Amino acid sequence: MRDVNNGDRPILAIDKLSTAIGGNAVVDGVSLTVGAGEVVALVGESGCGKSLTALSVMGLLPAAARVSAGRILLLGEDLLGYSEKEMLAVRGKSVSMVFQEPVASLDPLMRVGEQVAESLIVHGEASKSGARERAVEMLSRVGIPDARTRARQYPAELSGGMCQRVMIACALIARPKLLIADEPTTALDVTIQAQILTLMKTLRQEIDTAILLITHDMGVVADIADRVCVMYAGRIVETGCVDAIFERPSHPYTRLLLSTIPKLNGVRKTRLRSIEGSVPDISDWPEGCRFRSRCPLAQDDCGQVPPDFPVDGDANHTAACWHMDRLGEMA
Amino acid sequence: MSEARQPLLRVEDLRVHFPIRGGWRGGRVATVKAVDGITLEVGAGETVALVGESGCGKSTAGNAILGLVKATSGRIFFDGTDILAQKPDRQQALRRDMQVIFQDPVSALNPKLTVGRCIAEPLTIAGYDRKEKERRVDELLELVGLLPVHKNRYPNEMSGGQRQRVVIARALALSPKLIVCDEPVSALDVSIRSQIINLLMRLQEELGLSYLFIAHDLSVVRHIADRVIVIYLGTIAEEGPTDAVFEHPTHPYTEALLAAIPLPDPRSQRVKPPFALEGDPPSPANPPKGCPFLTRCPIHMEDCATIRPVLADTGWNTKAACLVRFKAAYG
C-alpha cells in the first residue's frame, strides 16, 4: 500500500467541483485527489455524477453541462482556466481516458495502429514512421498477439477485449501522468475483465501512471484500488483507503451497498439485503443529506448537509454522516 | 424430485445453427454453430442457470426453447409434450406457459404504452375481457411490489428497478410455469439488483415457478440457482448442483470462470492466485476440431486436438467434459 501523504504534490486535485446541467448541480462540491502512481476508485450508481466528474477533468463535457464552481488542478495547473487549444495539448499527453464501450470509442474507419500512433503525432513526439513503430510496440505491450499484423486491422476485426486493449494502448502511449478509466471493464466478460485488470495493474507500474477508476463494481474496486471515494447523488459520501472502506464502511450508503452483493461464501437462497427505493431524480434531491430518503438511520437533523467526519481518528478515512455512531443499529 | 415425475422442461441434444451466406449467389459458405448439442432438464420449482461468456450460445439456447429462434435439431419436451413436433398453433398454446424476462427493461417495454397496458397485452392476446384484465393487472402490480397508481405511468417515468418489475409482471400475466430469465439483473444498479433478486426468489416460492436463469454474474447465480450448466462455444463444459460446481469445479474452464470473479474483499483478492485464462473464445463458425476449449486451455494434451470430450461423472455429483481430467476413463 502506498502512503497517501507522501509529501509529493498530487497528480490530480479536484477542489469543490460543481458541474451543472440546466441549473441542476449534477456534481455538487466534489473534492478528491489522486497521488503519484495511485489508483483511486470513484464508486457510485448510475446518475450519481461520477462520469460527469471525469468529463469535467478532461474538458469533454456535453454541450448542456458546464462547470459552475471549483478547481481542477492537474500537476498544480488549474485546467478550468485553459482554452480549448491548451486543453488539446493536455489531453492524451498528461491525462488520457478509457471509456466503457471500447468498440464504440474507436474510429471504425481507421486502422488500430494509426489510432494508437495518433496521440504521438498530434503532440509532436514522434515522426509518422516513428509513431507507427512505437504503436506496434505498445500494442504488443498491452498483450495483443502478432501486433504488427493487428495494427493494420480495423476495430471491427477485433474482439471486444482486444478493442479495450487497443483503447488502453491509445491512452498510455504518450505516458500520461493520469489515466481516467470510466467503467473500463463493465462491457466485458468476467474472464476478459480479469485480463484487463491485470494489464492495468502491470502498466500502471511500468509507465508510472496514476489511475482514476470510475466503476460501480465493488469487486473491481477491491481488486485494483488503493483508495476509494464513494459518491451518491452528486456528492462524495465516504472516502478512505480500500481496506478501511471494505472493513469499516462508515456511511450507511457504503455499508448497505457492500451488504447487497451476494457473497460467494454466503448462505444461498436467503433474502439479500437491499436498499429500499431508488436513487432520487436530480430534480428532487432531498435537502441536506441526500441519502436521507433511503437511509435506515435518518433523523430530523439529516436535513442539514453533514460535513466529512474522520472515522476512528483516521483523517484519511472520512464519511459524511451525522449518525455514524449509530451504524451498529443497522446490522 | 421423485424419479417418477417428469421434469417440467426437458431439452434433448438441441442444436441451433445459423448459415453464413456469401459469394455471388448468396449460398451457404459457413455455419455458426451457436448451440451445438445441449441437453438439459428443469424441474418444477427449480432454478437452473446457464452460464458462460458472451457469444457462448446461452441466450440462443433460451430463445430456441421459447421458439424465438428456430431449432436446427433436437427435441424440447415441455410438460411431457414434444413442442417442436406440434402444429404451430398448438406450439403457441403450449408456449403460453413459458415466458421471458429480458436484460434491458428500457427496450423491453413499449414507450408508448402505459404500464397498465404493457402488462395487459398478453391478457388481450389470450382473450381476457376488460373487467378480467383490469382485475388481473391490479393483482400483478401488487404481486411485484408496484402501486395501483403506477398503472397510468409510462415506462420513461419509472426507474430502472420499477421497469424491471413491470417486465416481470407482464411475464407473470398468464400464470406461466417456466420463466426464461435472460440476464435479468445485469443492466440494473447494484442497489436495485438485490431487490429484483429477492423479488424473483419470493415469486418462485409463492407461485412455484421454474426459472431457466441465463447469466454471467456468478455470484448472483450461486445465490439463486439450484443447478448450474456451464456453456462454452455452444456445448456443455460442466454441469451439476450449484454447491458442487462452485466447490469442486472440474473443467478447467469452470475453474477459470470462478477464478475470474473479483471478490468484493481487498485482502482475499490480494492473496488470490493470478488469473491464467488467456485470449478470447474462438469463433463459433470455426471451432477447434477436438475440445472446444483447446485454444485457451492451460492443461491440454495432444489428444485434446482430435477427440471431442463428452460429459462424464466427476464423483462430485457433477458432470464435466474434459479429456485431461478423465484420462483414465478414455483409456
Image: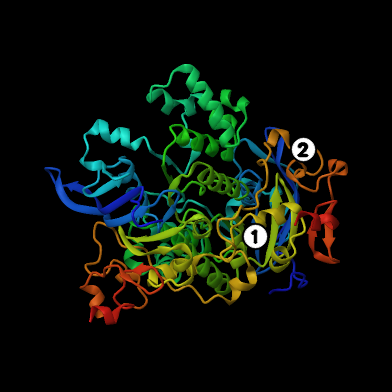
Vertical placement of residue A103 versus A38, above or below: above
Which quarter shows the N terminus of chain A?
bottom right
Q: Secondary structure at mark 1?
A: strand
Which residue bears the numbered disc 2? A286
What colour scheme governs how the chains and residues are painted in the rendered image of this protein? rainbow
Vertical placement of residue B47 versus A35, above or below: above
**Where in the figure is residue B91, as x and y percent of width and height?**
27, 36
Q: Secondary structure at mark 2?
A: loop
**Where in the figure is residue B2, as x and y percent of width and height?**
39, 56
Q: In the image, what residue occupies the spot 69% across and 52% down? A: A79
Tell me the kind of residue under disc 1: Ala
* Mark carried by residue A41: 1
Q: Of residues A223 and B173, which is closer to you in this image?
A: B173
Chain of the residue displaying label 2: A
**Where in the figure is residue B266, as x and y percent of width and height?**
63, 69
> Is any atom of residue B65 visible in this view?
yes
Vertical placement of residue A253 versus B171, above or below: below
Chain of the residue displaying label 1: A
